[in-house]
Image (spheres, rainbow, N blue to C red):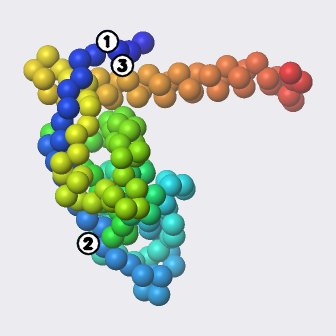
């Protein structure tokens, strides 16, 4: 099992790791009900605040939606196509094609900065660009995306196996055992 303590770590600025793209204002009165997730600056429901049929320049997928307003620094991975509020920035990895596992690792790393930002000290784009993140590095001193991906895959598999074990221990054909 991979261990975070077995790695060398180094600071990187967010602007060196991610392309930061803006969301776009879409007011309630301009929203048209639909099936496309609208991502707002909330800390729950994976950032989804509405379902719309609107499209605009913020439509994106396979990105982290990072709040700089509302629930500041909260962020969620969006593998599906959605529209982003102007209170949410879209982070897309620069050096590698991001995937679920890399983005989920980055999500946690970014959340480590939450205590630094609040209503009076916004996580705006200028601060985002300069903010440092501590990341595991490979032998060349570059972010170790392969490690990040494998680490999250192992954790996911561990959780799935725990559920399988739980279900196996608490069910039988035709009904449930009582614990």
Instruction: Indicate which disc, 3 or 2, sits on the residue closer to the N terminus.
Output: 3
Q: Residue at x 42, y 82 (%)?
A: 27
Residue that protrudes farthest toward the front in the picture: 120
Which residue is identified by label 2? 57
Whether residues under marks 3 and 1 lie with C-beta atoms below 8 angstroms apart, the answer is yes
Tag 2, which secondary structure? Answer: loop
Residue 6 image label:
1
In the picture, measured across the screen, residue 137 lies left or right of residue 61, that is left
Q: Residue at x 35, y 24 (%)?
A: 150
State which mark lies toward you, 3 or 2: 3
Residue that protrudes farthest toward the right in the picture: 178
The image quadrant of residue 38 is bottom left
- The quadrant the N terminus occupies is top left
Q: Residue at x 33, y 59 (%)?
A: 122
Q: Would residue 144 be seen by someone viewing this image from the given angle?
A: no
Residue 126 image label:
none
In the picture, measured across the screen, residue 68 lies left or right of residue 11, that is right
Residue 138 sits above or below residue 42 on the image = above
From the top left corner, tell me how far across and down residue 123 is, in percent: 31, 56
For this rendering, which residue is in front, 10 or 90? 10
Residue 5 sits above or below residue 46 on the image = above
Label 2 – label 1 distance at C-alpha: 42 Å
Residue 27 sits above or below residue 168 on the image = below
Tag 3, which secondary structure? Answer: helix
Residue 4 image label:
3
């Amino acid at each position: 099992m991979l261990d975070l303590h077995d790695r060398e770590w180094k600071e990187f600025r967010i602007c060196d790791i991610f392309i930061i793209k803006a969301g776009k204002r879409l007011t309630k009165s301009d929203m048209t009900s639909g099936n496309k997730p609208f991502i707002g600056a909330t800390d729950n429901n994976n950032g989804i605040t509405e379902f719309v049929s609107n499209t605009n320049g913020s439509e994106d997928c396979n990105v982290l939606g990072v709040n700089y307003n509302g629930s500041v620094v909260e962020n969620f991975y969006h593998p599906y196509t959605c529209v982003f509020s102007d209170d949410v920035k879209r982070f897309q990895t620069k050096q590698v094609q991001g995937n679920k596992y890399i983005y989920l690792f980055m999500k946690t790393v970014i959340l480590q900065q939450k205590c630094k930002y609040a209503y009076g000290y916004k996580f705006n784009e200028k601060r985002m660009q300069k903010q440092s993140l501590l990341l595991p590095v490979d032998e060349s001193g570059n972010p170790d995306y392969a490690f990040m991906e494998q680490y999250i895959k192992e954790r996911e598999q561990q959780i799935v196996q725990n559920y399988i074990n739980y279900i196996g221990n608490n069910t039988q054909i035709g009904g449930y055992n009582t614990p």
